[in-house]
Amino acid sequence: MIKQILKEFERSNKTIFLDDFIKIAHQDEKSGYYTTKKPIGKDGDFITAPEVSQIFGEIIAIKIIEKINQFNVTQFNLIELGPGRGSLMIDIVRVLDNFLDKNIFNYSLYFHEINKFYINKLKTIFPDSQIKDEFSDYRDQYTIFIANEFFDALPIRQITKKNDIFFETAVKITKKNKLEFSYVEPRKESLEYINSNISLANNEVYEFSPETNMIFEKIIKIMLQNKGYFLLIDYGYYLSPKISTLQSLKDNKKTNILDNPGDQDITYHVDFDNFKNILLKKNILSHRIVSQAKFLFENGIKERTQVLIDSNPSKNEELNQQLELLTNDKFMGKLFKVLEIDI
């Protein structure tokens, strides 16, 4: 179905640029991977940190409590981008409801989700929440944004330099009905972005996402209006490696990126340096980027794990395995980065 949509797009637009391809494969309303499949979990194509352990969400909840106490906040918006099945928010809300006096504290819960199955589940679990399409119309109050593995699924563009000439990555459909990568003359706005932001040598690749930048800037604008805290967690790098980080996953295994569009996750490493540069241009200095391991250890994951082990000695091995997956450099600890923003 997605391939037919791509054919029609190619007929109308002549070129299927990489971000067009990813947007159609992921977001097509009737056949897109993130709109119509169930990708998360052991029975899906990948496992996120909240699926690994409840402790991940509990640590974030404690961080939220720390922030609202720090700024004397009693009413706030709590907004999650790409919540999926709601695993992270289930753990967060459980802690918030246990530790916050409902007579004093009140929060409005919002989700940004496009998956029809997950939307129905979220409405059942959190009947008082709102599912949003646009980044607007929140209550005018302190606002907390959480984005765990959200930005790595948005469409990206790739520019490469060969023999001192720039090319943009595209996808073409061959006469044999196969998908292939092609390298074409860049769009004007892609060239302008590259020339304004980075220098490329021959055979280097730069990845960037206009959609990511647009969403990020909208969030920052809302935070500037309302004040707030933004916790962004994703796998990525501090500085662009200037190589292609594009990959795809199916059944928790790497696959060919052009196989089965709409039926597998297409992803890449998020550019945290890009976020930092946007913040600096806006003179927002209260932010930091650290590894997931550092963030979790600083906020008590080891101590929380020990408390759970003391309460459930039979789960000692299981809980320590979860801790390893979340914090060890061989797994999620170093690859995943955390961006914290206070405004």
Image (tube, rainbow, N blue to C red):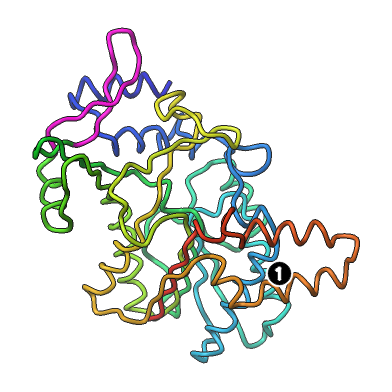
- In-image side of 304 versus 60 (left or right): right
**Residue drawn at 43 percent across, 35 percent down:** 29
Residue type (three-letter) at the residue carrying disc 1:
Arg
Number of numbered markers: 1
Instruction: Find residue 268 and report its image quarter.
Output: top left
Instruction: Find residue 222 and report its image quarter.
Output: bottom left
Between residues 236 and 37, which one lies in front from this camera angle? 236
* Direction top: furthest residue: 176
**Residue drawn at 33 percent across, 41 percent down:** 244
The residue singled out by tag 1 in the image is 94
Between residues 273 and 109, which one lies in front from this camera angle? 273
Relative to 255, say whether 102 is above or below. Answer: below
Instruction: Find residue 213 and report its image quarter.
Output: bottom left
Q: Position of residue 81 (x, y in %)?
A: 47, 58
* Quadrant of image for the N terminus: top left
What is the span of residues highlighted in magenta in the rendered image?
Answer: 168-186
Q: Position of residue 340 (x, y in %)?
A: 44, 73
The kind of secondary structure element at disc 1 is: helix
Between residues 113 and 188, which one lies in front from this camera angle? 188
Main SS class of the magenta portion in the image:
strand
Relative to 31, say whether 342 is above or below. Answer: below
- In-image side of 106 versus 182 (left or right): right
Relative to 62, say whether 5 is above or below. Answer: above
